[in-house]
Amino acid sequence: GKLLQAPLSSYPCSFPVTETETHWHTHGVTVENIPGATTVACEEAARILTGQWGFSPEDAFIFLSVKGNLGLCQSCHPDKGTQIARMSVPKISACPRPFRCLLEDEN
């Protein structure tokens, strides 16, 4: 994977976004709060889907519940220290890259 760099004016996220050949991934980071980390990761993905690809908020969360893959990158139980969650979004024609400007840069 690679860490993506988008112009700050088009960057709607609080945390880095990574991209692989088949998916792009948002992240959520919290301290001692696994549910909070998963919420942030989902919200970051939804923010990209609505802001970059024109999904409604409802469509974004429905899409993520059907096609997204939510997981924990780093955690320990009980919640001690930093918790990192990741939402993996498949690359499909409706959202082939996380940021529209990256798609435009390819052309």
Image: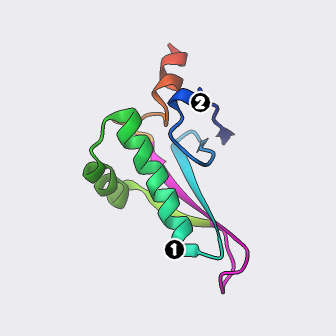
Q: Position of residue 81 (x, y in %)?
A: 73, 74
**Left or right of 72: which side holds 88?**
left
Please indicate, yes or no, whether residue 31 appears anywhere in the rendered image: yes
Q: Main secondary structure of the magenta part?
A: strand
In-front residue for pair 68/61:
61
The quarter of the displayed image where residue 85 is located: bottom right
Q: Residue furthest right?
A: 81
**Residue identifier under label 2:** 8
**Left or right of 18: which side holds 49?**
left
In-front residue for pair 49/2:
49
Q: Residues within 10 Å of mark 2 (few under 14, many from 20)?
A: few
Please indicate, yes or no, whether residue 93 appears anywhere in the rendered image: no
The quarter of the displayed image where residue 48 is located: top left
Identity, as a three-letter code, of the amino acid under mark 1: Pro
Q: Which mark is residue 35?
A: 1
Image: magenta residue range: 73-90
Q: Is residue 35 above or below residue 19?
A: below
Identity, as a three-letter code, of the amino acid under mark 2: Leu
Q: Position of residue 22 (x, y in %)?
A: 51, 42
Discs 1/2, front: 2
In-front residue for pair 105/32:
32
Ranked by sequence position, the earlier of labels 1 and 2 is 2
Q: Residues within 10 Å of mark 1 (few under 14, many from 20)?
A: few
Q: Position of residue 36 (x, y in %)?
A: 53, 69
Q: CA distance from mark 1 to mark 2?
A: 28 Å
| Residue at x 55%, y 49% (from the top left corner) | 25
**27 is within the stretch colored magenta:** no
In-front residue for pair 94/4:
4
Q: Position of residue 93 (x, y in %)?
A: 35, 33
| Residue at x 63%, y 45% (from the top left corner) | 16
